[in-house]
Amino acid sequence: MEVASEKIVNRDEITDTALSLFAGDDSIHIPESYIRTDEVLADEVVGKDEAYELPVVDMAKLLDPDSSAMETDKLGSACRHWGFFQLTNHGVDEAVAQLIKDSTVEFFSLPLDIKNRVAVLGKGAGLEGYGHHYSRGPGDKLDWAEGLILITQPVHERNMKLWPTNPPTFRDALATYSVEMTKLARRLLGFMAADIGDDKGELVEAFTGKRQSMAMHYYPPCRHPDKVMGITPHTDGLGLTLLLHVDDTPGLQIKKDGRWYPVRPLPGAILINIGDVLDVLTNGAYTSVEHRVIPDAERGRTTVVFVEEGTVGEMVTPLPGLLKEQEPRYKSLDIDDYIKGILKAIPERTRFADTLKI
Ligand SMILES: O=C(O)CCC(=O)C(=O)O
Ligand SMILES: [Fe+2]
């Protein structure tokens, strides 16, 4: 992402000390830079004595003419009220999903010097590569995780110096998985379009041929999960996010009405969440949801996240077709300026899309 080279977002490298810490070395105290107890405990986590259900959408029911309308309503309701859902029967090629899962696990288990061959290139050099997740205030706090972020589409924007060659399957896994996710996103967007009343294909068009990126995360277990954050609370700044759980370790929490709801990964499901840009494209009908990760006390957790951008031409804007019957709730902005805006907003922990609200 060329525009990402603005000197504003920082990703710290993973050091030997960080890895020993993550490996649970008792002789190392958790450094202050990882301690965020106040923030972790600030808002209530729903659970223990309260039953709750989070949205699940079934792709097989969306595709079946007998159940499609009802399931589309369910999809719409999840996108409007929760901004996320777990998608079952999604039809993703199992071998392709397995390849990216295995390659990711293998990558994170490699010695640090090999992983650091694709390390983040340092302050101001862009968001891609292996390292800590980008720092999102307060101060210089670090997330309890290793991450690898890469642009996957368009092909000419791939930064091959940062695409791991170890394990040898990784590059192929990334390329084939991104194709598979593109197909799935297309399909889902078609049902979202039906739900919001976009009968001109504008929503699918907005995502066709646009930039895509992937983030692989490994959240090591932490014996003090009330002290550290696996990923700082945020909304996804771009369009649509599709998340694959590599294991069944819990950790992701979704915020609704001021409380955190832990997600229990459904075996084989893909988790979908609405990013800020999709909120804008739907003129505020869909909600981008705040989420965070708290590491598990016992088990590591690995995820593979695919993100797709969406624009009308080059613009982040409500879909023109929707504005025939609705007043715009967001101003329009060129995607390059929008990305500059979100990069500036990341360390400030603000949601740049809010500045476009009318
Ligand atoms: O790994 C997860 O559960 C969440 C990752 C995430 O929020 C992101 O990559 O934006
Ligand atoms: Fe996210």
Image: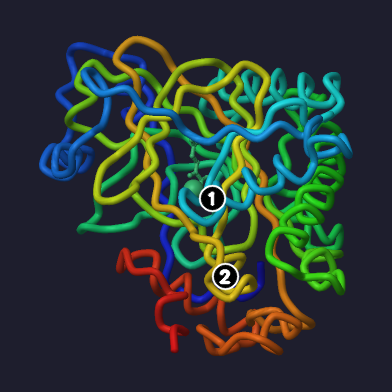
Say whether residue 237 is left or right of residue 52: right
Q: Nearer the viewer, mark 1 or mark 2?
A: 2
Residue at coordinates 81% horizontally, 73% vertically from top-left? 202
Q: Which residue is mark 1?
A: 120
* Above or below for 274 versus 280: above
The answer to which image quadrant residue 310 occupies is bottom right
The local crowd at label 1, few if under 14, some if 14 to 19, many if 20 or more residues have their Cα within 10 Å, is: many
* Above or below for 255 versus 264: below
Any mark on residue 4, and which? Answer: 2
Q: Amino acid at mark 1?
A: Val
Q: Amino acid at mark 2?
A: Ala
Q: How many marks?
A: 2
What percent of the width, then of the height, locates residue 177? Answer: 81, 36
**Residue 174 visible in image:** no
* Above or below for 334 versus 94: below
Tell me the quadrant of the picture where the C terminus can be found: bottom left
Residue at coordinates 45% horizontally, 73% vertically from top-left? 7
Label 2: element kind:
helix
Any mark on residue 19, and which? Answer: none
Q: Determine the CA span between mark 1 and mark 2.
A: 13 Å
The local crowd at label 2, few if under 14, some if 14 to 19, many if 20 or more residues have their Cα within 10 Å, is: some
Q: How is the image coloured?
A: rainbow
Tell me the quadrant of the picture where the N terminus can be found: bottom right
**Residue 263 visible in image:** yes
Residue at coordinates 47% horizontally, 75% vertically from top-left? 353
Label 1: element kind:
loop
Which residue is more in the foreground, 71 or 301? 71
